Image (spheres, helix red, strand yellow):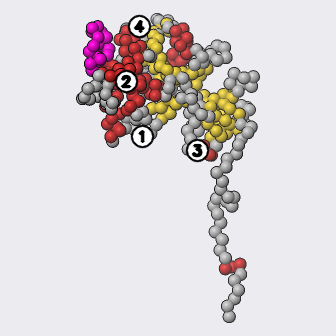
């Protein structure tokens, strides 16, 4: 005789994720407060909340779980909930990342598919370059210019150590494409000559300082923001390269009245990949060439040395001034190196 089933005949597998139904709806966080990310350190974010307001304070925060795949970077505007009092041993939670006005990106090299966001919401890239010790590398300057223009940022070239070499050549290379140039050097008593000109260019703006190790970037930051305390290094006499001293990007407020401006000091770099920039966009970093190409090159021109009917070579030879011709050829050669490198990585 068959029996009726009872509770022993049923098996229930406990759910590891609980019994609450999943939903895509997220809390509105109506009472969140907004802050600016000024530093990132191992999953903890330093924020300035109520910037320039009566309750301005520094808040330490972490990312909410729903933002686990989203990267928060220096310069971001974020909304936070939880304990945003800024008191000791408190920790807020970042729940939203605001829309970014600009994003400066780079890759490790031209074949690296992974973009690294350097900073968000800056409006000016300051490329710090020593005129000697270490020697300037125009290739990296060119790449940084292209990345800045791709991000919609202005470019300022800050030439340091002018007591060791003349800035005239680099001025001639970059002022024609719209980059502003300031020059500094240090006296025997370690005073930086030209610092006032740098301050004038940074006033009221959010500027990212970028450069090789050893070019004097951290020294410049410490002069601009006396309480910054950024570590400084030296140049190796054998390799001609500097030692990395800054390990993470940090935003520092310039001294002065409200709205005086911000500088973002970044770690020293040895390369600046452009895998994230399309080949067609590289030309935008070279205003002088871009204008000629738009007016005189045929549709679909690659602008490489073997491109048929490319007008850039003819333009480079047109001037009666030998110095102008030299500068044009230097700019054209630099542009073509970038395009060739990007073309190879695109095919791969």
The mark total stands at 4
Determine the residue positioned at 62% across, 40% down: 63
The mark closer to the camera, 2 or 4, is: 2
Disc 4 + disc 3, Cβ < 8 Å: no
Q: Report which residue position mark 4 lands on.
A: 163
Residue 106 visible (yes or no) = yes
Q: CA distance from mark 2 to mark 4?
A: 40 Å
Whole-Å distance between the Cαs marked 1 and 4? 40 Å
Q: Residues within 10 Å of mark 4 (few under 14, many from 20)?
A: some
N-terminal-most mark, 4 or 3: 3
Circles 2 and 1: CB atoms closer than 8 Å: no
Residues shaded magenta:
313-329
197 lies left or right of 11: left
Residue 343, image x and y in percent?
A: 33, 35
Q: Which residue is mark 2?
A: 294
Mark 3 neighbour density, 10 Å: few (under 14) some (14–19) many (20 or more): few
Sequence-first tag of 2 and 4: 4
Closer to the chain start, of discs 3 and 2, is 3
Q: Which numbered disc, 3 or 1, marks the residue that appears first in the sequence?
A: 3
The image quarter in which residue 275 lies: top left
Instruction: Indicate the secondary structure of the residue bearing disc 4.
Output: loop
Which residue has dot 1 on it? 113
- Reply yes or no: does residue 320 show up in magenta: yes
127 or 221, which is in the foreground?
127
Q: Which mark is residue 68?
A: 3
């Amino acid at each position: 005789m068959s029996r009726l089933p009872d509770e022993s005949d049923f098996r229930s597998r406990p759910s590891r994720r609980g019994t609450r139904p999943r939903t895509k709806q997220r809390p509105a966080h109506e009472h969140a407060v907004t802050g600016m990310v000024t530093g990132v350190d191992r999953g903890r974010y330093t924020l300035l909340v109520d910037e320039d307001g009566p309750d301005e304070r520094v808040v330490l925060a972490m990312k909410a779980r729903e933002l686990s795949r989203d990267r928060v970077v220096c310069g971001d505007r974020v909304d936070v909930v939880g304990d945003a009092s800024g008191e000791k041993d408190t920790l807020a939670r970042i729940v939203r990342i605001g829309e970014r006005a600009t994003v400066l990106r780079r890759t490790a090299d031209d074949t690296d598919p992974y973009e690294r966001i350097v900073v968000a919401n800056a409006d000016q890239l300051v490329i710090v370059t020593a005129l000697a010790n270490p020697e300037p590398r125009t290739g990296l300057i060119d790449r940084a210019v292209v990345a800045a223009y791709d991000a919609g940022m202005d470019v300022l070239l800050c030439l340091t150590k002018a007591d060791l070499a003349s800035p005239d050549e680099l001025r001639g290379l970059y002022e024609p494409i719209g980059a502003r140039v300031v020059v500094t050097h240090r006296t025997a008593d370690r005073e930086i000559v030209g610092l006032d000109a740098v301050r004038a260019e940074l006033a009221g703006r959010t500027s990212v300082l970028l450069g090789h190790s050893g070019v004097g970037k951290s020294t410049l930051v410490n002069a601009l923001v006396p309480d910054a305390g950024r570590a400084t290094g030296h140049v190796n006499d054998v390799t001609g390269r500097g030692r990395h001293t800054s390990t993470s990007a940090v935003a520092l407020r310039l001294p002065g009245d409200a709205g005086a401006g911000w500088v973002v000091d970044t770690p020293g770099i040895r390369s600046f990949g452009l895998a994230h920039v399309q080949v067609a966009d590289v030309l935008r970093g070279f205003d002088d060439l871009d204008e000629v190409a738009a007016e005189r090159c045929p549709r679909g021109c690659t602008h490489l040395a073997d491109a048929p009917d490319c007008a850039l070579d003819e333009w480079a030879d047109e001037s009666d001034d030998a110095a102008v011709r030299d500068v044009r050829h230097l700019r054209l050669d630099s542009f073509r190196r970038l395009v060739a490198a990007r073309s190879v990585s695109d095919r791969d």
